[in-house]
């Protein structure tokens, strides 16, 4: 007879583009792609069920920076604790985490571990919940890093594609066919707390209206499949001006993207990565090099990625890490 | 042979609910209904083409308060001037305006005259433009009152229904079947400039995120026909708290609406009118009296209106005023 200790699973969650220019803390999309060496851009977590009731993290690999091993302080650990509590499980979990997303890159690294962990834990338990039902636990996990329930990374990294999220729900948004994202990651860390501090300034109601115009136009464009309106709307006139000075070369990279035909370009998550959307993969591939060149003009080395905006979210993997 | 002086037309534009809680300066809906005496709640404008090239206003009726007769300073006059200029017309127009919406009520009175005037002028010219093509001229006209291009009244009062608007365009939004608005107008004037001054305060980014959550949820709910999400989203957590103190009894009226089953309730335009949305006309009709009673508890006399959110916009009328 199988015991608790025989039950295990591994899951992967891709990177993500938070905020998506128009939806600060609310809208994001998956970035399901590979590094140039063929390794996937995302985090993997192996989970074993254990007799002991607690959640323990036995290994964190893939990063030079130390991350908390205490379950409550680790995004993966806290997500699994929330799952365990909600399901009233009497057994525990042992986690091994492999980080495939640089921390402080604006690519959803802390969310990816939370998502992969809870997807793996659910699979190890025989998948009693659907992926969508795992959203609140992954969101609770991500809180360990951000201190607040922002689902703009968690939602799309769990369900894939472009999502609107809040503390209660995650809704998949329609994505025009062919839409492709380019993301360029300059090789330096921008701490989220510094990026957040740049927003601790007073805003005017007129700034709010200007950004709401973009947000509303963006959502209408998606539902109406209106490329012209999407091009007018994919912009951040509220947060980007405050954070751009923290990213050397930001405006040059954005301009390179727009000159190469981008629908829009802005900061991915809290930065320093920069993303742009293109109508198709071909134009995205051409623009990728111009965007990298613009960043490298400031002396930074960069890595770039290309992926469909409607990319895949988390999934269970065969084998273990 | 017909001369320029034989060409004339009359048009009507209904009242409107600006802001619609979630879309400050951006979203509104038509309020096409009658007063209790059977007269329509809206403005009518009769326009005659004239040999003289200028635009003149020969009469303004329906209001005790004097309004500017100089075309450039009157919303109807400025709208027709913009239309005349855009079409390169060499003849002029003579306007007679009948105001059927109280000024300073938050029901789109200044926009209604602009809309009715340009619709009548276009009809008098043989309707070379569609209603939708008249949007920029009506918007320009409304500027004479507000000093800025906010289309949240002009758009729906022109095209009907619920609209997203900005300086460039007006887009009709899908409205769930049966959706009905109740509007209660307390008998006092709240000057728009005072209502705007209440917003000349610093806002935090967190307030922006909370309201963006409502705006995005609202638009998604309309396109997905999701009543539950609409009920969570039809709210103003940004502007309403600043303006509510200017409207005696506001929170009592809002509470009366919500207790009577409203989807949501907030301030109509710059106030002091209060609106609420209901799933159907029957529940709206019941709530109407509770909302009025709550306002009248503060000693104010009130008038209330009920109309479909997807109500009609402007139209050409037979005869003249």
Image (tube, coloured by chain):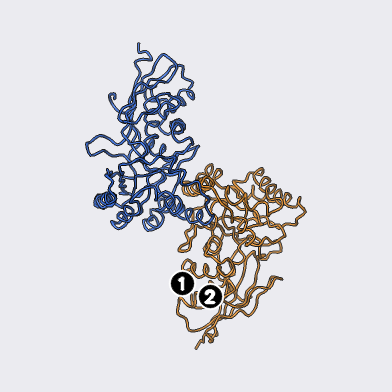
Chain colours: A orange, B blue
Which residue shows up at 72% across the image and 57% down it? A302
Could you say whether the residue bearing mark 1 is in a helix, strand or loop? loop
Q: Which mark is residue A129?
A: 1
Q: Which mark is residue B28?
A: none
| Horizontal side of residue B25 vs A233, given as left or right | left
In-front residue for pair A222/B11: B11
**Which chain does the numbered disc 2 sit on?**
A
- Which of disc 1 and disc 2 is earlier in sequence? 2
| Horizontal side of residue B30 vs A17, given as left or right | left
In-front residue for pair A236/A138: A236
Which residue shows up at 50% across the image and 37% down it? B168
Q: Position of residue A243 (x, y in %)?
A: 64, 53
The answer to whether A156 is drawn above or below residue A231 in the figure is below
In-front residue for pair A36/A216: A216
Could you say whether the residue bearing mark 2 is in a helix, strand or loop? helix
Q: Quadrant of residue B312?
A: top left
Q: Return the residue at label 2.
A: A80
The answer to whether A162 is drawn above or below residue B86 in the figure is below
Q: Position of residue B298 (x, y in %)?
A: 29, 50
Q: Quadrant of the N terminus of chain B?
A: top left
Q: Position of residue A259 (x, y in %)?
A: 66, 42
Q: Position of residue A234 (x, y in %)?
A: 56, 47
In-front residue for pair A272/B249: B249
């Amino acid at each position: 007879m199988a015991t608790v200790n025989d039950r295990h699973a591994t899951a992967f969650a891709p990177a993500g583009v938070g905020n998506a220019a128009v939806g600060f803390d609310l809208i994001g999309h998956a970035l399901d792609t590979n590094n140039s060496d063929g390794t996937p851009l995302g985090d993997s977590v192996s989970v074993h069920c254990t007799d002991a009731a607690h959640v323990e993290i036995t290994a964190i690999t893939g990063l030079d920076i130390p991350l908390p091993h205490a379950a409550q302080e680790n995004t993966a650990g806290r997500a699994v604790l929330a799952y365990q509590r909600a399901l009233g499980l009497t057994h525990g979990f042992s986690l091994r985490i492999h980080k495939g997303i640089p921390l402080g890159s604006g690519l959803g690294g802390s969310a990816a571990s939370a998502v992969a962990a809870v997807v793996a834990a659910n699979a190890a338990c025989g998948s009693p919940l659907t992926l969508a039902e795992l959203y609140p636990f992954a969101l609770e996990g991500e809180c360990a890093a951000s201190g607040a329930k922002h689902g703009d990374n968690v939602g799309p990294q769990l369900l894939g594609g472009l999502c609107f999220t809040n503390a209660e729900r995650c809704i998949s948004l329609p994505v025009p066919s062919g839409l492709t994202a380019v993301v360029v990651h300059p090789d330096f860390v921008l701490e989220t707390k510094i990026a957040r501090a740049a927003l601790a300034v007073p805003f005017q109601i007129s700034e709010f209206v200007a950004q709401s115009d973009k947000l509303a136009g963006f959502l209408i464009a998606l539902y109406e499949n209106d490329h012209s309106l999407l091009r007018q709307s994919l912009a951040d006139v509220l947060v980007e001006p405050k954070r751009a000075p923290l990213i050397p070369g930001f405006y040059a990279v954005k301009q390179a993207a727009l000159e190469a035909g981008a629908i829009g370009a802005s900061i991915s998550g809290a930065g320093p990565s920069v993303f742009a959307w293109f109508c198709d993969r071909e134009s995205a591939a051409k623009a990728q090099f111009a965007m990298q060149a613009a960043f490298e003009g400031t002396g930074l080395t960069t890595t770039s990625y290309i992926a469909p905006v409607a990319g895949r979210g988390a999934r269970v993997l065969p084998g273990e890490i």
